[in-house]
Amino acid sequence: MHHLLTLEHLDRTAITGLLDRAEGFRRDGAPRDLLLGRTVLTLFFEHSTRTRTSFVLAAKRLGADNVNFDLSHSSTSKGESLLDTLHTLEAMGLDALVVRHNENGMPKYLADHATTNVAVVNAGDGTHAHPTQGLLDALTIRQRRPDLENLRITICGDIRHSRVARSDAQALHALGVNDIRLCAPAAMLPQTLSEFPGCATSEDFDAAIGGSDVVIMLRIQKERMAAAQFPNAADYHARYGLDARRLALAATDCQVLHPGPINRGIEIAAEVADGPQSRILDQVANGVAVRMAVLTDLLTPPA
Ligand code: NCD
């Protein structure tokens, strides 16, 4: 692996290897000097709390230098093109460039135009992919249920605009999950299932959640949606919100995931987000370990 742009082409062995490495970092910690002398630059064109912070922590915990590119004070705000920015940063001696952008394919564009050996990591591009989120969600689920092939998993919310849903579906399918249900109102279901291998769709959340071992809730991505498509929050909560009544329809030990940021009272009720079945903060903790595993994989030569 030279870049991590999507999970589309990673097979079970590759994904399992990254999850095992992340699990090892969580269990045993990591050598503080593993990436000593390497430079990881985080370049975020969209807001982020968890993803950016966990990449920064991951780099620092492995001993790498981290530079957080401050877009509001950079020359991109003076109109410097993205490629000029890339080449300028490369000239400073970068090893990894972690990039989030609102346009699909921008991390790949940068990877294709890099003139050095820099490894590009996609930290979320438009509606396309969020590979490290897909990995950390798979790790979180696997920690409680290693028998992934037996699981019924429901992903509910704004699937159409969600890069998380795409990367989750690809990771889980590659790991052998056979029953993945995508649930949303018609306007938020994907127009094609080509990026959702092995998934079925439903507009009925009560039916979809029945017997689920895992439910992954998603935020409505208003920023990627025309105003006319945005539903009334109360109606949405009534039909697609996860509250205690609905969670009771799932398997008794059903795990509840959400990539954050959560909108309490819209896609998820506070009683569930803060309840005993919620894995939301475990996802955050796993996020650091997964990003450490990805940076290590990209920046250290194979043993
Ligand atoms: C997600 C993202 O930005 O794609 N958040 C995250 O990375 N934890 C999901 C979202 O913004 O709803």
Image: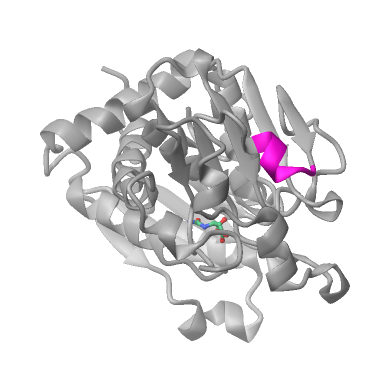
* 254 horizontally vs 128: left or right: left
Residue 265 location, quadrant: bottom right
Q: Can residue 118 be spotted in the picture? A: no
**Where residue 37 sits: x, y (%)?**
21, 48
Q: What is the quadrant of residue 18 in the picture?
A: top left
Q: Left or right of 298: which side holds 214?
A: right
Q: Total label count?
A: 0
- Name the chief secondary structure element in magenta: helix
Give the left or right position of residue 116, taking residue 283 as reference.
Answer: right
Residue 49 lies in the magenta stretch: no
- Where residue 226 appears, as percent x and y from the top left, is 84, 71
Q: Look at 48% across and 32% down and name the residue there.
A: 2
Q: How is the image coloured?
A: one colour
What x and y, as percent, mark residue 195? 74, 34
Q: Residue at x 13, y 38 (%)?
A: 29
In the image, residue 289 above or below residue 124: above
User: In the image, residue 9 lies at what x, y percent?
Assistant: 62, 24
Residue 104 to residue 256: above or below: below
The C terminus sits in image quarter: top left
Q: Which quarter is ligand 1 in?
A: bottom right
Q: Residue at x 33, y 65 (%)?
A: 67
**Residue at (37, 68) in percent of width and height:** 68
Above or below for 226 versus 61: below
Viewer can see residue 2: yes
* Front one among 287 and 268: 268
Between 157 and 239, the one nearer to me in the picture: 239
Q: Nearer the viewer, residue 109 or 283?
A: 283
Q: What segment is highlighted magenta in the picture?
A: 203-208
Q: Is 39 drawn above or below residue 53 in the view shown?
A: above
